[in-house]
Amino acid sequence: MAARSMPVPVSDAPGVSPWVPVPFRVEQRAVETADTITIALTPPKGVPPIPFRPGQFNMLYVFGVGEAAISIAGDPTQPENLFHTIRSAGRVSAALSQAAPGSTVGVRGPYGTGWPLAEAKGKDVILVAGGLGLPPLRPVLYEMLRDRERYGRIEVIYGARTPKDLVYYNQIQKWRDRTDLRFQTTVDAAGREWYGDVGLVTARVPDIRIDPANAIAFLCGPEIMMKFTAQALEAKGMTDGSIYVSLERNMKCAVGICGHCQLGPEFVCRDGPVFRYQDVRRFLSVREL
Amino acid sequence: MTSAPSSDGLRLVDHRFFEGVKGGLPQRLQPLTIERTYELGDMLVREGDIADRFVLIFEGKVALEIVLPDRPRVTIQTLGGGEVLGWSWLLPPPQWWLDARAVKRTRTLEIPAPELRAALDARPEDGYEFLLRLLPVVAQRLDHTRLQLMDLHGG
């Protein structure tokens, strides 16, 4: 598959201000967990679907409440339905979580660099997600499974607090049934109804079957998870140049102007949110930022 | 659960615990082993029982569970092939502090604690080698516990 050019943000279309959200319609709303939902957004008449790359995000605006950066969680080949998985954590995300089918949500985007899929071609791939880190990696899986023969082994490790906190539960069962990838789920604690793994994602890393000299890893989740998973991958023989992380910061403008998401010399919204671990690891160990 | 002295089945030398070991330690311990197979739901050990053996898991999955008064039991960790059950058998009082239950058909090699301790006492170099391998298991469990306290999957 040819590498795609950088998608143009919908707000960058001729005659549209980058600061003005485009009103999209909430087409579907699915409950994932007690505090997490997935919505599908469709563009208004006359506005084409937004092409996006795995790992990019949109700024979603709840009119009268505010705006939040949310990763795109759908299939990049089907941008007509823009999927976002949202955990109710703050004022804006709580309002987004209540968005009913038929209601309107403002969209600016897509923004950010995305995961380096071209670099993953021909390599073993490790995807590690913690908590709500799976949605930004789901488009990667869609892409890789569509072009499965272009990649080596694919190992996915997904960790959540409890079985009830796992998102995309039914889809995960289908992924687990596939013979061309290994999808491991693990939780922090569980009752007897859970027959899966209990423990940290880092504990699953020694079991992955990869060639560390020809492998690439994409990590997404809490920074502490990514930091210790990267350590475990390095113990497995990988280098920090072949490990990528998706960082989350307080994104406001999303176009590298306001500086709210600045991390050292980088603007997470513009230069990230996906970074080579080698380039940002020093910032994940700074005592005070 | 079925058990049999290990003769031509699982070999200690193939277990990750003994990976890279030199000097014949797993070969010397092999005659002491008992091979066991646990079916789904079988208990390997129960909290409070005497920790009478060292358990090396070759295949399957074992849930470590804590029984809480008036609450459903909680699985705090699962162990799979290549992992070992613990070190309670080594330190006095030798007592299991958790329940361990097979959540998949599980195959193990197990070494009775008195014989293992005697073998390690008899050859201190073997005892040292063994502890060098057991200590990382202890350290890793401690690290994981710390990380769990930091809510690693919470984001």
Image: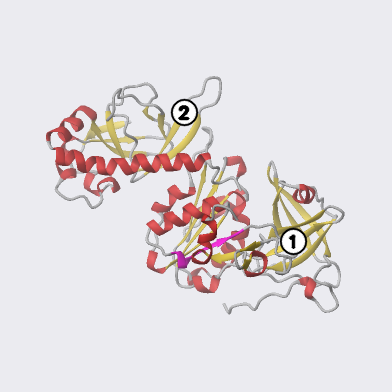
Chain on which label 2 sits: B
Q: Which residue is mark 2?
A: B66
- Name which quarter of the figure residue A289 lies in: bottom right
Amino acid of disc 1: Lys
Give the residue at x 27% y 30%. B90
Q: Residue at x 86, y 77 (%)?
A: A15
At horizontal 19% and vertical 44% (from top left) the residue drawn is B26
Q: Position of residue A27 (x, y in %)?
A: 79, 57
Q: The disc numbered 1 marks a residue on which chain?
A: A
Q: Residues within 10 Å of mark 1 (few under 14, many from 20)?
A: some
Image height check: is A160 above or below B46?
below
Q: Which residue is mark 1?
A: A252
What is the x, y in percent for residue A67?
78, 57
Q: Is residue A25 visible?
A: yes
B96 left or right of A151 in image: left
Do labels 2 and 1 touch, CB within 8 Å? no
Furthest toward the front, the residue is A288
Identify the amino acid type marked 2.
Answer: Ile
Classify residue A53 as left or right of residue A205: right
Q: What residue appears at the point 49 percent right and 65 percent down from the top-left corner?
A: A278
* Residue located farthest toward the left when viewing the structure as drawn: B122
Residue B93 image label: none
Q: Magenta part of the protein: which range?
A: A240-247
Q: Is A151 located above or below residue B93 in the figure?
A: below
Residue count near mark 2 (Cα–Cα under 10 Å), binned few <14, some 14–19, many ≥20: some
Does the magenta segment cover residue A155? no
